[in-house]
Amino acid sequence: MAGNSIGTIFKLTTFGESHGEALGGIIDGCPSNVLLDFDAIQFEMQRRKPGQSSIVTQRKEEDEVQFLSGVFEGKTTGTPIGFIIPNTNQKSEDYSHIKDTYRPSHADYVYEKKYGIRDYRGGGRSSARETASRVVAGAIAKQIIPTIKINAFVSSVGEIFIDKPYQDLDFSKIESNAVRCPDLATAEKMEAYIREIKKQGDSVGGTITCVIQNVPIGLGEPVFDKLHAELGKAMLSINAVHGFEYGSGFCGAKMKGSEHNDSYNEDGTTKSNLSGGIQGGISNGMDIYFRVAFKPVATLLQKQDVLTNQNEIIVQQGKGRHDPCVVPRAVPIVEAMAALVIADYYLLNKTYQTQ
C-alpha cells in the first residue's frame, strides 16, 4: 500500500490499524534542538481521543504517545522521530458481523477488490483512528512555527451554522464546549441536535473552519505546489472529508471581479481578504482561512441494506462505538494537517534564505 506519507522536508509516515497493537509514525526532517513540550503534544491527543464526551464514540483510549527515537533530553536530535500510540481498548468482536459484508459508503468493498484482503476490525487502515498519528506530528510541527497561530473550530452541524465572521469570534471559547464551537449559543443548538441524531441511531455531517494567523509572506510554490493546493490535499486526506474551500471559496464564483479583488494598502496588506491569505499559490501575509466539509459518519445504528461477498443484498444493523457526528473530534486533526503543511513550507523557505 502506497500513500502513507506527507511532506517534502518535514515528512510524516504513519502506520498501524484501528485494532492492531499500536498506531505510530516516523517524522523525518524535523530540525534539531527543538525543545519539545510533551504536555502540549498530549493535550492535542486529549482533544482528538475517543470517549471525551457523551456526543462522541465511547471507545476508551488514553492515547498516550511513546517516543522511540529522535529525542534526547527533551530535544529533537535531527534524526527520524519514531513514536507509537498503543491501542488498549479494542473490541474486535463488535465487527465480526461485517466479516463477509460490505457496508454502504465505507472502504470495505474497494479495499478488498484492490488488495484482495481487508482488516474488517474497525475498518483497519481506513479507520479514522489512523489520524491519531497525524495529531502527534502536527503538535510537533506547531512547535517549529510557534509564532504562527492555527485555530480550527466547528462552524456548522447539519443545517445549524455560525452566522458570524471568524473575526467576531473568541477562539479561547473553542474548548469550552463539547462541540468545539466558539459561538456558545450556536454550540448549544449543535450539541442538542447531535444528541437527537444519536438517539435515532443516525449520523450528521458538518464543517470545520480553520484560521491561520501571523503567516509570513512567501510560503508556497507556483504551479503544482501552491500553498492552497497542499492545504486542500492535506484536508481531503482526512477521513470523511468531502469538500475544501479557501478564502471566498464557492461564494467567490458568484461575484464580479470588481467586488472580489483585494485592494492594497500602502504597507502591502490588503483592504479585504477574499483571497484567503494566498495569491498565486503563495502566502501574502494576511490571515489564511478555509473551510472543510465532513460527510455524515457512514456507520449507522439502524438497519441498512448491505452487500455480501457472495453478491447478495441483506439487511444488517451497525454495531460498535461510533461518532454520531465526527466534526467535534476532527478539529485538532484539521489543525494538525494545517500545521504539517505550513511547517513544511516554512522549512522549505528557510532553504531559499540560506542559499
Image: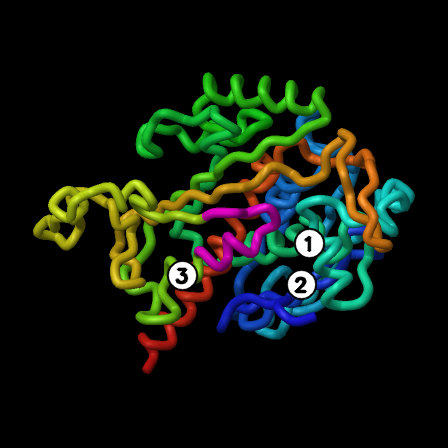
Q: Mark 3 and 2 residues: CB-CB less than 8 Å, in contact?
A: no
Give the residue drawn at x 44%, y 53%: 146
Residue farthest left in this picture? 266
Q: Is residue 324 visible?
A: yes
Q: Mark 3 and 1 residues: CB-CB less than 8 Å, in contact?
A: no
Q: Amino acid at mark 1?
A: Glu
Range shown magenta: 232-243
Q: Give whichever of 244, 11 is nearer the camera.
A: 244
Q: Give whichever of 89, 192 is nearer the camera.
A: 192
Which of the labelled discs sits on residue 229, or is there none? 3
Q: Is residue 72 visible?
A: no
Give the residue drawn at x 60%, y 37%: 296
Q: Please rate how many residues cluster around mark 2, counting C-alpha atoms within 10 Å: few if below 14, some from 14 to 19, many from 20.
A: many
Q: Which residue is mark 2?
A: 14
Q: Which residue is mark 1?
A: 130
Position above or below: 167 against 44 = above
- At numbered mark 2, what does the secondary structure look like: helix, strand or loop? strand
Q: In the picture provided, is 88 more to the left or to the right than 5? A: right
Q: Amino acid at mark 2?
A: Thr
